[in-house]
Image: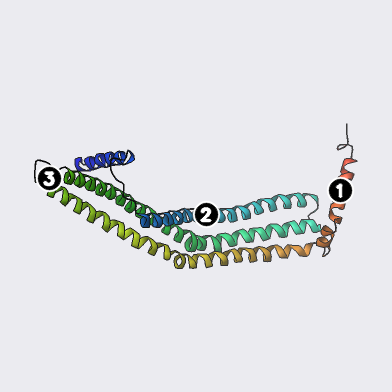
Amino acid sequence: MSWSGFKKTLNRTGTTLMQKTGQIERTVDTEFQDEQVKFKNFEKECQALQKESKAYLDAMRAMTAAQTRLAEHIEAFYGAADKTSEGAMASHAYKASVSELDAVIQRELDAPYRTTIMEPVGKMNAYFPIVNEQISKRNKKLLDYDAARSKLRKVTEKPPEDPSKLPKAQQEFEDAKDVFELMNQQLIDEIPQLLDLRVPFFDPSFEAMIRMQCKFAEEGYEKLGGVQRYFADNVRDDYAAGQLDAQVEGVLQEMKELSICGAS
């Protein structure tokens, strides 16, 4: 930081302290504050959207990976008992189905999801540091403006012996006012424009997200639906009627009757 920049920072710090103690009047711009609140809310939502978009893709990949590992264990379990049984054939079909589903995610959904959803969200979030920097500059210019106004008032109320101080203070005030008002008005005008663009900007990404979620569901239904043919048609009805629970309890009872599972 240059000496000039250090001096400005020091002066602004002093102005802030004097405003807190009521020695310098603080300018309150409700119009800007309203726009800043809207912007901050939009920034927060976009950052959350970026985080959750990534979490969804990670979860989708994690789920298919978990299904693949689960299928490997189930196939090993049934294959060790009887490779020709309906259960073994169903477990093999299940493994093949989830492997295909995982491949579909990698081949058809992963890259498009990143391109159409995560990248646009990331680009939108990249604008926020730029806008926040402008807001920070505006706030600094506001401190300069308040300080110059306070100095002018003091010189006006109690004229100094040096007659050149009054026009100098007047000029400093006018310069600080012009710089602040220009930057302030730019933010007031352009923040709403940025917010208005969010809907047309995100429309394609939102549509792509719905289509890819639908594609994922359709692929899962199609791939796993083929495994159902290895099971009896009445399995779902038996489950609803509680008969499957009874079958499980019956098998558990048989296990308990075994010597190695019985009570000692």
| Residue 165: numbered disc | 3
Q: Amino acid at mark 1?
A: Glu
Q: Is residue 126 visible?
A: no
Question: Do the residues bearing badges 3 and 1 touch, measured as CB atoms within 8 Å?
Answer: no
Q: Secondary structure at mark 2?
A: helix
Disc 2 to disc 3, C-alpha distance: 60 Å
Disc 2 to disc 1, C-alpha distance: 42 Å
Between label 3 and label 1, give the one nearer the viewer.
3
N-terminal of the two: label 2 or label 1? Answer: 2
Q: Residue at x 31, y 42 (%)?
A: 19
- Left or right of 84? Residue 7 is left
N-terminal of the two: label 3 or label 1? Answer: 3
Total marks in image: 3
Give the residue at mark 2.
54
For this rendering, which residue is in front, 79 or 199?
199
Disc 3 to disc 1, C-alpha distance: 97 Å
Q: Secondary structure at mark 1?
A: helix
Question: Do the residues bearing badges 2 and 3 touch, measured as CB atoms within 8 Å?
Answer: no
Residue 75 locus on image (x, y percent): 73, 53
N-terminal of the two: label 2 or label 3? Answer: 2
Residue 99 locus on image (x, y percent): 64, 58
Residue 152 locus on image (x, y percent): 19, 47
Q: Is residue 196 above or below residue 252?
A: below
Quadrant, the N terminus: top left
Q: Secondary structure at mark 3?
A: helix
Give the residue at mark 1.
249
- Left or right of 238? Residue 189 is left
Quadrant location of residue 151? top left
